[in-house]
Image: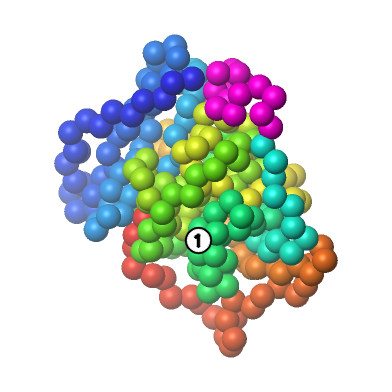
Amino acid sequence: MRLTLSQPPALPGRASGRPRCRRWTAVGRSGIRLGLLAAFVGLGGACNRVDLAAPNAADPRDAAVSESSADPAGPGDEFVWPEDPSHPILSISVESERADGTIAIELMPELAPVTVARVIELAKEGYYDGTTFHRVIPGFMIQGGDPNSRDRDPSNDGMGGSDLRLNDEFTRAPFVRGVVGMGNTGQPNTSGSQFFIMHDDNRSLDGRYTVIGRVISGMETVDAITRVPIDRIGRWGPRDRPMENVVMKRVAIQERVAGERTTSTARREEGADEATDLPSRGSG
């Protein structure tokens, strides 16, 4: 599937002075256009949204691409995932009315050493604690990691993130169910803190987003999150936002020794239960 991006003139700002997202257009093989929000906020800020390369724009749940032409690796050229019993684990404790549980992500520094190191740093700082999965599209992915989502004001969810922009670390790792990637703005080197977990395969994303690892346990929690009622048209905020808060109550790093997990790394030496100051708003 061929994916092209076109950028119309910038939209005027809202009366409140908050910048609006520019609209990007993804064009599939059928020629049907799917409008996606991707934008710049403040000084280099942006809406970190993953493109929907959907064959049928009427239903974003059709995002999973099954055509062999969408597989850049080609037939018989299977990607080999790095294996190391010492890989760190990103442990996400999820809390909501309909989706409780823990998602364990095996981080793979071999794929993206700088990005993985940054995610570990943010997790240890408590950066992700209390944020939400602010964007959920069944059959595609769930996305979170924006500190703006912590304030429970849905209008700015997806527009914030870490001030530090990361260079892209693209690999041939395939975007299949359970793979974890970093959000970006559609522009090079714009990943920050937002990440997404694939609910289903979508190989059209390969080589366009940085892969940091994959889920090793807790996909049933990801499945439960996709069953939460979702605001598809954006009545109270961005499109595809859950109508109940799906909170990452605690995000911690667990080190492993010979495949066994050790005690979770404390996010602070002291005051682990204290509120974490939010960094200035950026993208990502």
Q: Residue at x 54, y 80 (%)?
A: 274
Of the 4 image quadrants, the one containing the C terminus is bottom left
**Residue denoted by label 1:** 114
Residue 239 shows in the view: yes
On the picture, is 73 further left or further right than 240?
right
Question: SS of the residue at dot 1?
Answer: helix
Residue 40 at x, y = what percent?
28, 48
Q: Which residue is drawn at 63% across and 31% down?
A: 201
Instruction: Name the main secondary structure of what is drawn in magenta.
Output: loop
Q: Quadrant of residue 120?
A: bottom right
Residue 172 at x, y = what percent?
57, 38
Compared with 248, 237 (above or below) is above
Of residue 127 and residue 180, the one placed in the foreground of this image is 180
Residue 19 at x, y = what percent?
24, 49
Q: Which residue is drawn at 74% across and 57% down?
A: 84
Which residues lie in the magenta part?
Answer: 60-78
On the picture, is 122 further left or further right than 200?
left
Amino acid type shown at disc 1: Val
Give the total of numbered labels. Answer: 1
Compared with 111, 198 (above or below) is above
- Extreme residue in the bottom direction: 270
Of residue 74 and residue 164, the one placed in the foreground of this image is 74
Q: Which residue is drawn at 64% across and 57% down?
A: 107
